[in-house]
Image (tube, rainbow, N blue to C red):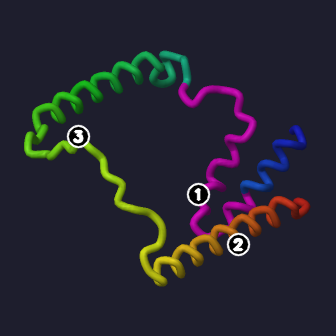
Amino acid sequence: MPEQLVQMAIAAIRVAERRGLERVGEWVHMLGFHGHFVTKSRGYSTNLGTLRETRARWRADRDQVDDELEDESTPVLPVWEYVGSGCLNPGDVLLAAGVEASIRVAREALLDLRARPPA
C-alpha cells in the first residue's frame, strides 16, 4: 500500500476521533478506491443509465409540482437598496470578535494536528 494512502488513513482516523466528525472513520476503507461508486454490471446492480433516467423523472415530477404551487402574491422588488453593513452596537462587535477568535483557534488546532507525526 502506498505511503500516501497510509498517511491519509491515519489522518482520517485521527479526525474521526473528534466530536462531531466520527462518521469520517466510516469512509477510510474508500481511500485509494479506483472504481466507481456504482457498478456497470447489469446483473449485479443498477447501471448509470437507470440512475439518470430515474433522476430525470423525479426532477420532472418535482418541477411540475412546483409550477402548480407557484404563488402570485410574492412581491418582486425591481430595485435593491443598500441598507448598511458592519456592527450596529457593541454587542455585535463582541460577537464578531468571538467568532473570529474561534475560527483562529480552530485553524491553529488543524495546523497542529497536521504537523504531528503519525502514531
Q: Secondary structure at mark 3?
A: loop
**Marks 3 and 1, the one that precedes in the sequence:** 1
Comparing labels 3 and 1, the label whose residue is closer to the camera: 3
Whether the residues at callouts 2 and 3 have beta carbons within 8 Å, the answer is no
SS under mark 1:
helix
Residue at point 76% right, 68% down?
108
Q: Which mark is residue 9?
A: none
* Residue bearing mark 3: 78
Dot 3 amino acid type:
Pro
Reply above or below: 37 against 84. Answer: above
Q: Which residue is mark 1?
A: 23
* 1 lies left or right of 49: right
Q: Characterize the local packing of mark 2: few (<14), some (14-19) or many (20 or more) Cα atoms within 10 angstroms.
A: few
Considering the image in quadrants, where does the C terminus appear?
bottom right
In this rendering, would 93 be left or right of 79?
Answer: right
Q: Specify whether residue 26 is painted magenta.
A: yes
Relative to 4, 21 lies left or right: left
Residue corresponding to mark 2: 105
Which residue type carries mark 2? Answer: Val
Real-space CA distance between mark 1 and mark 2, rounded to the nearest whole angstrom? 23 Å
For residue 70, what is the image quadrant?
top left
- Alpha-carbon span between mark 3 and mark 1: 45 Å
Mark 3 Cα shell of 10 Å, populated few (<14), some (14-19), many (≥20): few
Residue 5 at x, y = what percent? 82, 42
Residues under numbered marks 1 and 2 in contact, where contact means CB atoms less than 8 Å apart: no
Stretch in magenta: 13-38
Look at 87% across and 38% down and name the residue there.
1
In percent of width and height, residue 60 lies at 25, 25
Is the residue marked by circle 1 packed among few (<14), some (14-19), or many (20+) residues within 10 Å?
A: some
